[in-house]
Amino acid sequence: MVFSDGSVTGFGSVAYIRWKLVTGKWWSSLVTSKSKITPKNRITIPRLELNGAVLSKRLKEFLVMKMDTKFSKIYHLVDSSTVLGYLHKSDSKLKPFEGIRVSEVQTSGTFVDGRLQNWYWVEGGLNPADLCTKPRCVSELGVNSLWQKGPAFLEEDFDQWPVKRDFKTGRLVGEILPKAMHTVCLTTDDMSNVFKDLLEKFSQPQKLFRIVAYMLKWRSSHRRQPVVPGALTAADVQNARKFWIRFVQQEVTEEMQKSASSHNKSDTHGRFRRLAPYQDDDDIWRIGLRMREFVPFTEDRKPPAFVPPKNRLTYLLMRQAHQRKHSGVEETVARFRMMGYWTCEAAKLAKVIKRSCVTCRILDQKPLHQVMGGIPQEQLINPVA
Ligand SMILES: [Zn+2]
């Protein structure tokens, strides 16, 4: 007996074997099962049931091929009469999805009086394949459980089984599952903790930018703001990058304001006064210096944005700069600034990263030199004149 089922989370098939005892009773046991996770594509539940039926047919063929036992009868049991109806239709009248699967089942079975032999419908509550399709507790799968022994009717003669051969002839309609459904539940009041966690969790700045780009896109659509549908654009990622810079600059905002207001004054107190910081149109603190009006060396042609020292993002950005070519400290710092960032004690940070870089250790290994061989004995006995 091969049962099959399908649900929103998965579809699967499970096979049981039974034989008659000397006492005249039937004894049944689980042989094997196979289940698969539901694809992310739009797919209806009846179609998943059909997938389960195909899996059931394949599982039967596998068992027949691999087992030495000769079976007197093999039954397929599904709990969807619509799917059973589809298995009796001509595949040429079906859509490719159903047609391919129905054809596979039909070619493996035999028809008598227009009926596919050995395919039956059973009530959903008596179908053990249901256990393949939903998350279950281990305790439900123990000895003498429905999973191990199969439904109770397996211990009765076939005439007593609560199965039917009637089927519906309707279309495979059902609930359409949304494509790649993801539920994001942000329940914290303080979003800064979420971003701090993200910073700790991910080690690639580009990945952090993309995650926040998706979050910003989702927020825009939620607020009914115009959003370009589809994949992320370069502008989305750029906005997310600016967001991260603003986020990490929060810890130095006060100092930056002091340094900016006191610039060029004799009574300066700001810690970053020598950097002549200023805030641009995106509220990002940038380094002024003499190149304030024209900075051709950064990728965005703007003065570099200040990222606080000893910040995780600063570390990740410097590491990204280093990993482009695994070059030395000076080149790493130059690349870091070309990427559009500036931080205090950048060379010190670059040195730490260089020292801890495994790739650099391998690349910087000195090659082994061969030790010179000894002088041959002949040359010692008969030295060349
Ligand atoms: Zn390196």
Image (cartoon, rainbow, N blue to C red):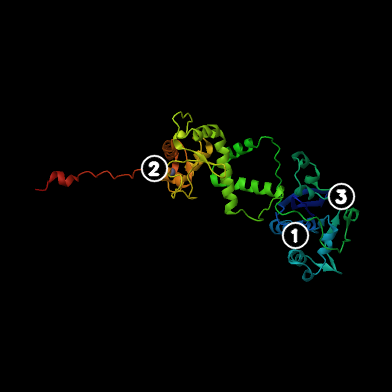
Quadrant of the rendered image holding ligand 1: top left
- The residue beneath circle 1 is 54
- Circle nearer the N terminus (1, 2): 1
| Residue 268: % across, % down | 46, 30
Residue 322 in sight: no
Amino acid type of disc 1? Val
| Residue 375: % across, % down | 20, 44
Amino acid type of disc 2? Glu
Mark 3 → mark 2, Cα distance in angstroms: 78 Å
- Circle nearer the N terminus (1, 3): 1
Mark 1 → mark 3, Cα distance in angstroms: 24 Å
- The residue beneath circle 3 is 153
**Of circles 1 and 3, which is in front?**
1
Q: Is mark 2 on a helix, strand or loop?
A: helix
Q: Is mark 1 on a helix, strand or loop?
A: helix
- The residue beneath circle 2 is 330
